[in-house]
Image (tube, coloured by chain):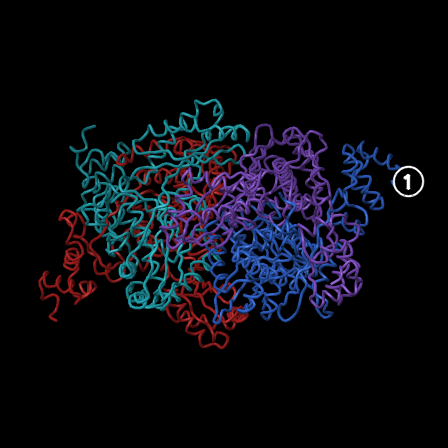
Chain colours: A cyan, B red, C blue, D purple
Amino acid sequence: MPKLTDQTDEEILSLLETGQIKQYTLDRELEPLRAVQIRQQFLLSDYPDHIIDTIPYKHYSNYETATKSCCENVIGYVPVPLGLAGPLLINGSEYNVPIATTEGALVASLSRGCRAVRESGGIDSTQTYFGMTRAPLIKFSCGRAAKQAADWILEPGNFEKIRAQFESTSRFAKLKSINPKQAGKLLFLRVVAATGDAMGMNMISKGCEKMLQFLQTVDVFENMTVLSISGNYCVDKKPSAMNWINNRGYSISCDVTLKCDVIKSVLKTSAGALAELNSSKNHVGSSLAGCIGGNNAHASNIVAGIYLATGQDIAQAGTSSMAMVNMECLDRGDLYVSVTMPCIEVGTVGGGTSLAAQQNNLQLLTSAPDVNINAALLAQVVCGAVLAGEISLLSALCSGDLVKSHMQLNRAER
Amino acid sequence: MPKLTDQTDEEILSLLETGQIKQYTLDRELEPLRAVQIRQQFLLSDYPDHIIDTIPYKHYSNYETATKSCCENVIGYVPVPLGLAGPLLINGSEYNVPIATTEGALVASLSRGCRAVRESGGIDSTQTYFGMTRAPLIKFSCGRAAKQAADWILEPGNFEKIRAQFESTSRFAKLKSINPKQAGKLLFLRVVAATGDAMGMNMISKGCEKMLQFLQTVDVFENMTVLSISGNYCVDKKPSAMNWINNRGYSISCDVTLKCDVIKSVLKTSAGALAELNSSKNHVGSSLAGCIGGNNAHASNIVAGIYLATGQDIAQAGTSSMAMVNMECLDRGDLYVSVTMPCIEVGTVGGGTSLAAQQNNLQLLTSAPDVNINAALLAQVVCGAVLAGEISLLSALCSGDLVKSHMQLNRAER
Amino acid sequence: MPKLTDQTDEEILSLLETGQIKQYTLDRELEPLRAVQIRQQFLLSDYPDHIIDTIPYKHYSNYETATKSCCENVIGYVPVPLGLAGPLLINGSEYNVPIATTEGALVASLSRGCRAVRESGGIDSTQTYFGMTRAPLIKFSCGRAAKQAADWILEPGNFEKIRAQFESTSRFAKLKSINPKQAGKLLFLRVVAATGDAMGMNMISKGCEKMLQFLQTVDVFENMTVLSISGNYCVDKKPSAMNWINNRGYSISCDVTLKCDVIKSVLKTSAGALAELNSSKNHVGSSLAGCIGGNNAHASNIVAGIYLATGQDIAQAGTSSMAMVNMECLDRGDLYVSVTMPCIEVGTVGGGTSLAAQQNNLQLLTSAPDVNINAALLAQVVCGAVLAGEISLLSALCSGDLVKSHMQLNRAER
Amino acid sequence: MPKLTDQTDEEILSLLETGQIKQYTLDRELEPLRAVQIRQQFLLSDYPDHIIDTIPYKHYSNYETATKSCCENVIGYVPVPLGLAGPLLINGSEYNVPIATTEGALVASLSRGCRAVRESGGIDSTQTYFGMTRAPLIKFSCGRAAKQAADWILEPGNFEKIRAQFESTSRFAKLKSINPKQAGKLLFLRVVAATGDAMGMNMISKGCEKMLQFLQTVDVFENMTVLSISGNYCVDKKPSAMNWINNRGYSISCDVTLKCDVIKSVLKTSAGALAELNSSKNHVGSSLAGCIGGNNAHASNIVAGIYLATGQDIAQAGTSSMAMVNMECLDRGDLYVSVTMPCIEVGTVGGGTSLAAQQNNLQLLTSAPDVNINAALLAQVVCGAVLAGEISLLSALCSGDLVKSHMQLNRAER
């Protein structure tokens, strides 16, 4: 077969239709834009022209990265409006918060929250945990054999052997612990590792695979069957009490003392009203509804907005959004506010952060030349932004203007 | 003050910096691209040029809609790679599945699942529920007063009065039920309504506000305080048992019987291996991890990809991803597979679907001229695509090639 | 074989050992005490005498009822200490609260709580729901067939037909609703019924069995398989969000306004301290621990004590103990307290209430000749007692004397 | 005041009524039976005689222990029928299973399960964890201070200091770990300790109190406020994901391979039917109902029955009943069954085990002279009995005779 680059579009289409080449061959052999255009014709030949014409696909400089590591069967891209909220004052530094969203009023509301935070002296933020997790699932002949395997792993000397294997797969992966959970003959090994500035799922999966290869050489694992590199005990991308209780990714605690006059002038409400609403809605309401990790008003909006803007795995936005908001009325009308997030799954390298616009948005977080935008810092910005978003929305609810503000900013829905 | 259009960029920047105009004035008075450029200078003056230059913002035709109803403080957009999976055969029709993602291997894997479904005769899908929800939170002087209020609402004649008020706010909103939950003096009213083809949060919020205004005129509500238009008992954008048990948005059930030879040739595994993995991982593993709504392997990937491509509220992707996968081995090596999703929160009008590319992606679902891409159909495609995604990923896990395929397709992460 | 009554103990033992008679024959043919004694010899012949001698079995007047409907293989009884707390003032009437327990300090603490309630004017209690549930599990050939079956049931005319069948099994059973939940080809039917003053599990099971027999005659159910009279979607005796959200048995709301001086004199603490502890422990702590239905300090102690004393199904004490405690500081140092319990599974007839001592303890609740101790009233006493128990324990925790009081009252543990 | 023993009943009643003596004085100064009789008159003077006469209170040898450490305001006892199930074959030894219950059919059903286990070769049981927990709740001035406190505790040298303090309170208490959880300025310290053969709540509470006293002398804890010795993060007596995931008390795994012919002859069903029901009911049904820890049919019945018989804290029966049942069809019609229970909260000393009948029931577990009935062994019997109870009930459900057997054995309910 002659090189694709020497063939006409029609010829290539014919090759595709007859199955002589696969779609991914286009990406490998053609320059990106031509590959996309031919794919559009191949997949969408039955569609009216205006459909194809409306797909944004030109003026995109990242096809090479995108097709190699982020997406297959690419026919273009989806543009999501990008707004900038902030600045958000955390631990004495100011951060812009890039938000990619289609939720009207969100950026404006977040910006108001940032202002209230800033005028009250800023957020204090601490990191209480980091560890990405993956839980392979293995099976033994009986419960006793599974128990022996779990015991073997927990023996310090053996753990060191596993660590050596695990860490041989990446210079960034650092094995922290393995927590076995047994159910009869099944054994789930929740592996916890530091993964540098990568979110780390791929890195830890590689390490786990190596670990499993090694375990297969150990006597007590002789009869094990590897059912899956992941047994849903990780937990990745599913709501779970596990990550709420035992953490995943970064765990961040942020707090701020909102000043009485700021609550009045910026947020148009009072400490008492906010504290009562937080208790009634974020605690009583969420508990009545059987929420685990849902003691907040709309953390998910903020998290999704930042994740999308900065190339995080958007399928993790839901689980990363678990957050508890606590408030306490202080003397003189001030209000103590804290936000606790146990499971912020972020990275600043790898995955979607490889794309230029997304990486650029990470750089937008700060213009301070000495600030290194690493994953830990991003996690703090996420948690701080959630705090700002919470106080602004709760204030809007207190003063009853949620519907009103949505109506103004979102006229598109009937 | 002279009109903004008559002023230079420098003059406008000066007005912004001195607070004489607000950011939103730019969007109202300038043509979009100029507004964005000036905002970039205003917000990012301290940043090096290459940062600003890397923000995609030109060649975007939707600034007017975006700034009016989807985003504030817009500085550009974020392009997310768009792949097309499928076709997916549901109820006898074929659908393309547009996926916007940065998760390498996802579209390829989904396409394989679609092929297995197609070659097995397709998915059968049924809708078991629709109702969007919102739960205002009101407070009374005591539990007895709250009880009387709840009783009043449940009285059929009174419910009809509320319905009339509620439905007066939109020609699409149809009140279905109100489920009160009392906690002492607090009363949460979970309002359920049909909302046409809109996802419907704004529509139902308007209706609830009208309802509350009306209730304030009723004797037994005389002493109520409206704490919030939402009391987290809805539940919106938080993981909850509520929506898992009592549904929200669309509830869809999909099933397919995978043929033995297709499992072998396309999925490279067997019915028995898939069924065992589904039981051990999606049921045992998820239950051990305290998941509610997490009986699946990666529904969230599929849901987030479609939501992003079609302009859904991406902050709802997490809650919409609750899904249960069941499998049963049949005679002759066939495999029955079902996916149940109780809470698919989608619309085809309003919100992000107003944007041209996103709306266009909705149209990409089908080229059949007689198919109306409404919200109910979109929900079925979401659930069907989750099914296809599950069988493909679980098959990959069975044959142990997850890490391998990720490594190939995602070389960007170290 | 001659009548057992004509045979010696040795002869009967021989019959048992050779399998010629079963244990239950003893209960049917011998007078109870002799049956118990022979069974002790049969089962415990290898044990030293002092073991057998220490089993309480004499002086028990209820063997006939016990062996017929409450227990098999009876070798005696277990005596549990019975204390009387109260009186507890609810809706203007006073109730004694019988508590069978081995938890030192519980009755004393509960009595203190009752005193605080009484001196504050008493509890106001309302019932917000009643319905016992049972959820048969049926299976169809495919999801669509399951959907059609669910639709058939929800059709009002068909529901009436089911009701007629269901209610034909008992003059007390009243069918309230059937809530279908589908998962692929599986269908769970959560049947809700009023069951008079019986807790009602047996009554509703009979009704469900009749319902299933009837459904088998209906066309759309032709191919159904009844997998189980209960599919765990009821939910009986397992912790669940289902019952917390959708109720089971009696749902009761109790509240009281504790007077400032009573909080000080009786409870030795303050409204502010109690409210802060309730928020931090019963809401923040429970939410962090992933509790659903656990927004209380020790409802389970009270519920188990009353259930045991009054012959309730003690295996339901855990699920019945789901409770949320809310507190709000009022003017002048008063404290509003409410307790919400959605799932109090009680009866005053049937089961363990047939036993004389247990039935007598029900009568102990009140000496008012005009008060009918029915299940609804018992449920209110349970909820009210939980409230009294909560304020007393939380007060003890506030003043730091929990360990101290346990040490005094429970010297037996080292 | 003359000694109570020198006064008539009427004189003592008068002292009680005028408040000159408290109820507990009766227990301290009078012989038990007289104390109980006078209390009955004092508390129940308005009741008809037959009520008082029906309270069992004579022939009870344990009043001294009962009034000192198990109950206050004692007016008698509640007799609960005691049946003996078994023998249950675990790890090669046979155990009787004492069950105190009013649930007809339970003991008979359990005995059938024990027989199936026995005839299949017995259960294999392993202990995977032990640790009782208590989580004091402390408060700091801000989140950063709480973080520093948590860090201090986790520092190995500091942990050793805490351990020394903690273990000084009891020769049995062994501190295993402290897991801090922070929510803003609040800090929950989940303390895990071995507690010998006591269930251990009191023991660990004493140790925690000592720990807190010590921490107050440490600089970084200078400004802490102890809000409560328990912050509900333990978790004690509330349903929680915490204990399900992170264990409490004893974690036991039991399994057995049921033989094909035993399933047929004893259980009247087949491996396939049992496995399908277990999957559909205990996994699918429980997950749909939002159960955490509820992957079983009726563990609670067994646990409550044993707990009551052996003097365990009956208010812990609900949480201790969390259990997962797994089944797998093997070759030749055999069935692998496992039960996993993470949170069996039992002891063989202290609390209700101090009472003679309850302690005696512990001794009834085995007549083997060399078997030490300690807490670990009791936990294994609990888990094994749950397994036996599950297979018997599930078999009854498979063959559709649940309602029938209840009807026969429980004729008391209408």
Q: Position of residue B100 (x, y in %)?
A: 29, 46
Q: Quadrant of residue C90?
A: bottom right
Q: Residues within 10 Å of mark 1 (few under 14, many from 20)?
A: few
Task: Report how many numbered discs are placed on residues in the image.
Answer: 1
Left or right: A287 in relation to C18? left
Q: Nearer the viewer, residue D261 or C161?
A: D261
Q: Position of residue D249 (x, y in %)?
A: 56, 41
Q: Position of residue B214 (x, y in %)?
A: 43, 74
Q: Could one spot residue A382 in this view of the protein?
A: yes
Q: Nearer the viewer, residue D64 or A44?
A: D64
Q: Quadrant of residue C43?
A: top right
Q: Nearer the viewer, residue B245 or A260?
A: A260
Tell which residue pokes out farthest to the front in this image. Answer: D1
Left or right: B74 in relation to C352? left
Please say if D282 is above or below C391: above
Q: Quickly name the residue at label 1.
A: C6
Q: Position of residue D227 (x, y in %)?
A: 48, 55
> The C terminus of chain A lies in which quarter of the figure?
bottom left
Q: Could one spot residue B302 in this view of the protein?
A: no
> The N terminus of chain A lies in which quarter of the figure?
top left
Chain to which the residue tagged by mark 1 belongs: C
User: What's under tag 1, amino acid-wise?
Assistant: Asp
| Secondary structure of the residue carrying numbered label 1 | helix
Left or right: B267 in relation to A26? right
